[in-house]
Image (tube, rainbow, N blue to C red):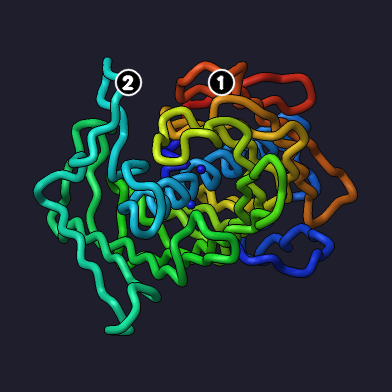
Amino acid sequence: MKLSFSLLSLIVPAFILSLLTIGSCSKEKSTATDQQQQDVSFTSVEAEAQGETAFNDVFDNAMGANNDVGIGGTGIFGRPEPGNSFYRLDSLPPCATVTITHSNTSNFFPVKIAIDFGTAGCSRPSDGHTRKGRIIIDYSNRLTIPGAISTTTFENYYIDNIKIEGTATIMNSSSQNSTPPTKQYKIDITEGKISTPDGNYVEWNSHKTITQTEGLVTPTIPKDDVFQIEGYANGRAQRGNLLVAWQSTITTPLVKTFACRWITQGTVKIDRASANTNNTWTGYLDYGNGNCDDIATATVNGVKRQISLH
């Protein structure tokens, strides 16, 4: 959510986050050196960034499919081309097909929108990625309406060679009577999984609140919209024979705009605990100072690494 925020919640009871246990077949060792512990902690921070990046796509795509279900022209449906500030509403490549299905012949909603990129790979020059498989979005109402819900699932969906799985639920939690008007969304990612051909993966669950802070007076123009993201997540990552679990909390709200593919600002605190010791390591993920780029900084115990979110 740096893929487009691009694209991707129901209100759920608050619960106490706990670290997932490390699998017995591939454990962190209590005899690990400080350097090994540090490397494991960086894996946790990078996995958090990878999960946020992959599922950042969902919101933009759900909002951007068309004006009937959202505002149209965001995510894969309309990203500014390099060097231009305007949105291309025809930005889906010809190899992608969109199918709209109404389950009630007398009402527009509920409605299902399926984006099919085929099985051979469908390239989109404006973001440099090749996609295949299907994104399926079910809408209870237009997402700009308080109480509206969308649910996004994936069928054999890949971005380049990375497989995306899971369910993303978006709920418009805006107040209907606030003055001035506000827009707020809650997003839950459940059983999210990002897998690479080498067998590595990230499993991710998150609960986020997204509040629009700019662009409220121009509801049909997405490029001036600015959002803040708050919330928490937990997950685990497989890296070779290492399985690492973590939990994260946004400590400074993340900032995103529809005009940029990446999260541009904000910090996340990531805690990782060894399964066999009481040694807890904490890392931080810093998305920058507002520039639209795919660079973030991971910090563990004062050691910094620059990571790419592309």
- Circle 2 is placed at which residue position? 85
Please name the residue shown 80% across and 60% down the image: 18
The quadrant of the image that shows the C terminus is top left
Q: Spatial distance from mark 2 to mark 1, Cα to Cα? A: 28 Å
Location of residue 48 (image quadrant): top right
Depth check: 76 or 35 in front? Answer: 76
- Neighbor class of circle 1 (other Cα within 10 Å; few <14, some 14-19, many 20+) is few
Can I make out residue 229 in this image? yes
Residue 296 image offset from top left, x and y in percent: 56, 24
Residue plotted at (32% across, 84% down): 104
- Residue ID for mark 1: 306
Q: Is residue 19 left or right of residue 104?
A: right
Q: Position of residue 186 (x, y in %)?
A: 63, 56
Tell whether 262 sits left or right of 21. Answer: left
Q: Which x, y percent locates residue 45?
A: 64, 37
The picture quadrant where one finds residue 13 is bottom right
**Considering only vertical position in the picture, is 110 above or below 86?**
below
**Amino acid type of the residue tagged 1 in the rendering:** Gln
| Residue 96 in picture, x, y percent from top left | 16, 53
Q: Residues within 10 Å of mark 2 (few under 14, many from 20)?
A: few
Q: Write the residue at 59% across / 51% down.
A: 242
Task: For marks 2 and 1, give the one nearer the viewer.
Answer: 2
- Helix, strand or loop at disc 2? loop
Q: Is residue 234 visible?
A: no
| 93 relative to 217, above or below | below
Residue nearest the observer in this picture, 45 or 122: 122
| Snapshot quadrant of residue 267 | top right
The local secondary structure at tag 1 comes to strand
Of residue 189 and residue 75, the one placed in the foreground of this image is: 75
Q: Earlier in the sequence, mark 2 or mark 1?
A: 2
Which residue is drawn at the image coordinates 45% and 67% (left, top)?
141
The amino acid at mark 2 is Ser
